[in-house]
Amino acid sequence: MKIRWLHSGYGKLQRKIFFQIVLMIPGAWVLFLVVYNFLSGKIANGIVTLIQWVLFVDYQDALHIYQFYIRNHMGEMILVFEGMSILLFFYLSLSWFLRYFRQIDEGLDDLLDGKEIKLSPEMEPMERKLLKVHHTLERREMEARLADKRKDDLVMYLAHDIRTPLTSVIGYLSLLHEAPDMPEDQKEKYVQITLDKACRLETLVNEFFEITRYNLQQTSLEKNEIDLSYMMMQMADEFYPILSENGNMVELRIPEDIRIEGDGTKLARVFQNLLKNAASYSAPRTVITICAEETKDMVRISFENKGKTIPKQKLSTIFERFYRLDDSRTSRTGGAGLGLAIAKEIVQLHHGTISAESEEGITIFTVELPKINVHENGERDTENMQEVLRLS
């Protein structure tokens, strides 16, 4: 059975500390022999001579002093020297051990300063962890800078885009105001254009609000039982006008008895964002397929559409805030780039997962959420579901 400390990768450090402690025993014994030989035997004559020279006494007096003060108290003196030697070895060993803490401290300073981290060989596991922390901090800093840049760019684009519909609204309203006797068909045309531009302006203003709300809101969940099939049918009906503009339609493949547990308002927003995304990037006159199936503990919901293939390098970033697949901003696909990021946050709050795959013109977004037993709570709550969809 392996020792846990060895298994953790610090075997070199443990062995070095162990041998350091073991070496204290023979070191203390050697010091004891040196002190004993110094105080007795052949060295005793030298000590007597030294006493004569220091105290200016004759040999007999020096010998008497040696025997009375040193020879008769040799045991106590050896014990004192032995204790001092142990303390000395302990201090040296502790100082040697503390140098690893100094290395870690210097490594942290280098980490904060962005310098290269280099520790002793026996501290290699700690060095790897510090390097991992360093790379993680660098990656997060870069991601934060990119997110801020995307946000700044989108705010700039939105501010620019607001001018166009606003100018049109003012222009057509001015024409209607200046020509009250304008023919009815022309007046109706101008009113319709003004209404369309005002709706577009409202969408852009809402995107500004979305950017602020995404950064400030504290998300909490109010969970209840959700009839997934009914929710998707209601949602498909709501999106019919948007889908019909390009000849698209929704096909539902969801068993009627599938239920999930979660915050109905927030999950409706997840599915709306995914359906809106599929509608925005689907090829004209194609079908968007929404499927659902149960696994042991989860319900898997997928949104499949046909259109352009999403490059693999973009699949890993489409769930980041302020990320958009298209660099061009059109009325069909333009947005703040928050829909998928918000969807991911809500799904994770429900202890679920969301992912995307795209190959040969077919893109599939998949959401997995905890399911609820259909027999636990009887009937559907149709009125509550309608209210959830109305508020979302």
Image (cartoon, rainbow, N blue to C red):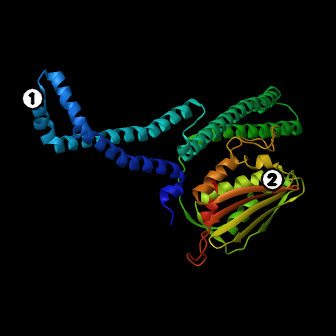
At mark 2, the secondary structure is: helix
Query: Residue most toward the top?
Result: 56
Query: Which residue is identified by label 2?
Result: 279
Horizontal side of 187 relative to 100 (left or right) equals right
Q: Three-letter amino acid code at disc 2?
A: Ala
Which residue, as the protein is rendered here, is positioned at the far bottom? 375
Q: Taking 325 as reference, is 64 above or below it?
A: above
**Splitting the image into 4 quarters, where does residue 322 fall?**
top right
The mark lying in front, picked from 1 and 2, is 1
Which residue is identified by label 1?
Answer: 61
Task: Give 38 or 2, whichever is nearer the viewer.
Answer: 38
In terms of depth relative to the viewer, which is nearer, 259 or 344?
344
What x and y, as percent, mark residue 325?
A: 79, 44
Question: Dot 2: few (<14), some (14–19), or many (≥20) neighbours within 10 Å?
Answer: many
Q: Which amino acid does label 1 sit on?
A: Asp
Q: Which of 144 and 52 is in front in this view?
A: 52
- Which type of secondary structure does the marked residue at label 1 adopt? helix
For the residues marked 1 and 2, what is the alpha-carbon distance in whole angstroms?
113 Å
Q: Residue 252 location, x and y as percent?
A: 78, 67
Determine whether, in the image, residue 209 is placed left or right of residue 164: left
Marker disc for residue 141: none
Whether label 1 touches label 2, CB < 8 Å: no
Looking at the image, which residue is at 72% across and 60% down? Answer: 366
